[in-house]
Image (cartoon, grey):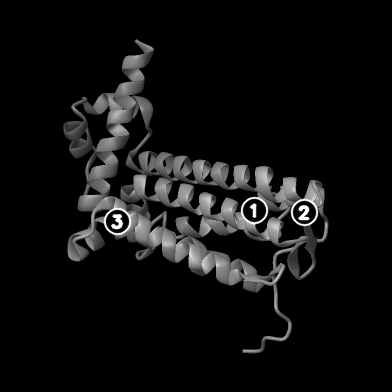
Amino acid sequence: MEQTGSEAKERIINAATQLFSQKGYDATRVNDIASAANVNKALIYYYFKSKEDILDYMVHSLFNKAVSIAMDFIQTNITQMVKNGYLEIRPDRLHFINDEAVSHFMDSACKFVEQVVDYAVDNRNIIRILMLESLKNGKHQNSLFRLMEFMGGDEKNPVLKTITRVDKDFVYSDDMVLFNFFFSIIPIVSFAAYFDDYKAVSSLSDSELRSSFLRVSKVVIAALVSGSDILLRNKSFKA
């Protein structure tokens, strides 16, 4: 019985995701979701208080998994490299002790980006919903900016707390937060949101498109490394 209930809830989420991304959140009715999920409306209200509650569930699930992926990368790579003496966190940079440490970090960072890209593409319909919502004055207008909660200096930020446990010199600058959001997160979000559209106009297969994006991402990651450092802020730069 529990498995049947779980399957029904999953059908509701899948149907709502499809309809929200195709018709838009506002244009989708609970009756539409019930019909697409092949359940009665009462069952939807058993699991969710409202249509808004369904979208809330999607958003929380998406972000919770994304944060989990990021935390796993930080704990198994950055903090471990600091503990092993391969990486020093200085107020303005990440400093690697040798080329081998740089190479190890680069390989790990590329695998992390690959994992994030795959997760984003797998959940591209939900991402499309959030992008549509961000362009209007809806409840979830600023949902994408929730990711900034994990890039700032707030004490509740699990990323900051994890890194500062091993090295208190780590801080986020305003430029670093802006860079991470607009040059790291938004490109992946846009790639996922427009994945199917770009594939159609470019005639690339799923694997070809994915591989192409990851190759470009690797170039961008490599460009961040200057010698044995990744600069977190550059005081010499003036706009």
In contact (CB < 8 Å): disc 2 and disc 1: yes
In this picture, residue 109 sits left or right of residue 159: left
Q: Is residue 153 left or right of residue 119?
A: right
Q: Quadrant of residue 8?
A: top left
Name of the residue lying farthest toward the top: 1
- For the residues labelled 2 and 1, the Cα–Cα distance comes to 10 Å
User: Which residue type does callout 2 highlight?
Assistant: Tyr
**How many residues crowd mark 2 within 10 Å: few (<14), some (14–19), many (20+)?**
some
Q: Quadrant of the C terminus?
A: bottom right
Residue 163 versus residue 181 in the image, above or below: above
114 in relation to 64, above or below:
below
Counting every numbered tag in the picture gives: 3
Secondary-structure class at tag 3 = helix
Q: Nearer the viewer, residue 164 or 100?
A: 100
Judge whether 178 appears above or below 52 on screen. Answer: below
Disc 2, disc 3: CB below 8 Å? Answer: no
Residue 208: assigned label: 3
* x 70%, y 64%: residue: 172
> Circle 2 sits in a helix, a strand or a loop, which is it?
loop
Q: Residue at x 27, y 30 (%)?
A: 11
Task: Name the residue tied to disc 1.
Answer: 104
**Between residues 233 and 104, which one lies in front from this camera angle?**
104
Rendered location of residue 79, percent (x, y): 73, 48
What residue type is disc 3 on?
A: Glu
Relative to 214, 198 lies left or right: left
